[in-house]
Image: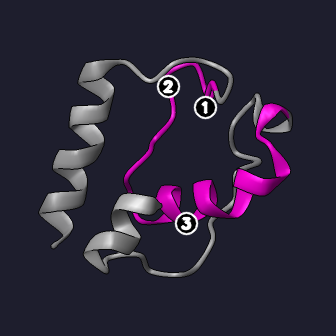
Amino acid sequence: MILAQLLGTSAGTSGPINMFRDSNDIASWAASAIGIDVSDGLFNGYPDGTFQPLGNLQRDEAVAVIVRLLHQR
């Protein structure tokens, strides 16, 4: 959401995060931002239906998010 706000691309509407099997692990302070980023198509989660909020973002995943954000511009 920070990148989206900086570039002025955030839609401002939050999507459902309960679609992720591990949504209970998403911190309450981050839930709306993650919902917005999911709605904006920046994050899709993993093929196993998880978001893995406690995991580390890998370099290739970060690049994919940045590319998606730049394509929305």
- Looking at the picture, does residue 9 appear above or below residue 3? below
Q: Residue at x 21, y 34 (%)?
A: 63
Q: Which residues are magenta?
A: 25-52
Label 1 to label 2: alpha-carbon separation: 6 Å
Q: Position of residue 70 (x, y in %)?
A: 15, 60
Tag 3, which secondary structure? helix
Which callout, 1 or 2, points at the residue further toward the start of the chain?
2
Label 3 to label 2: alpha-carbon separation: 17 Å
Q: Relative to 5, is 33 on the left or the right? A: right
Which callout, 3 or 1, points at the residue further toward the start of the chain?
3
Depth check, front residue: 20 or 13: 13
Depth check, front residue: 2 or 73: 2
The quadrant in which residue 5 appears is bottom left
- Looking at the picture, does residue 14 appear above or below residue 41? below
Magenta stretch: includes residue 29: yes
For disc 3, the marked residue is 36
Which callout, 3 or 2, points at the residue further toward the start of the chain?
3
The C terminus: image quadrant: bottom left
- Mark linked to residue 51: 1
Q: Residue at x 69, y 37 (%)?
A: 20
- Looking at the picture, does residue 1 appear above or below residue 14? above
Tag 2, which secondary structure? loop
Q: Residue at x 44, y 24 (%)?
A: 57
| Disc 2 packing (10 Å; few <14; some 14–19; many ≥20) | few
Tag 1, which secondary structure? loop
Magenta stretch: includes residue 46: yes
Indicate the amino acid at tag 2: Tyr
Q: Residue at x 69, y 64 (%)?
A: 32
For disc 2, the marked residue is 46
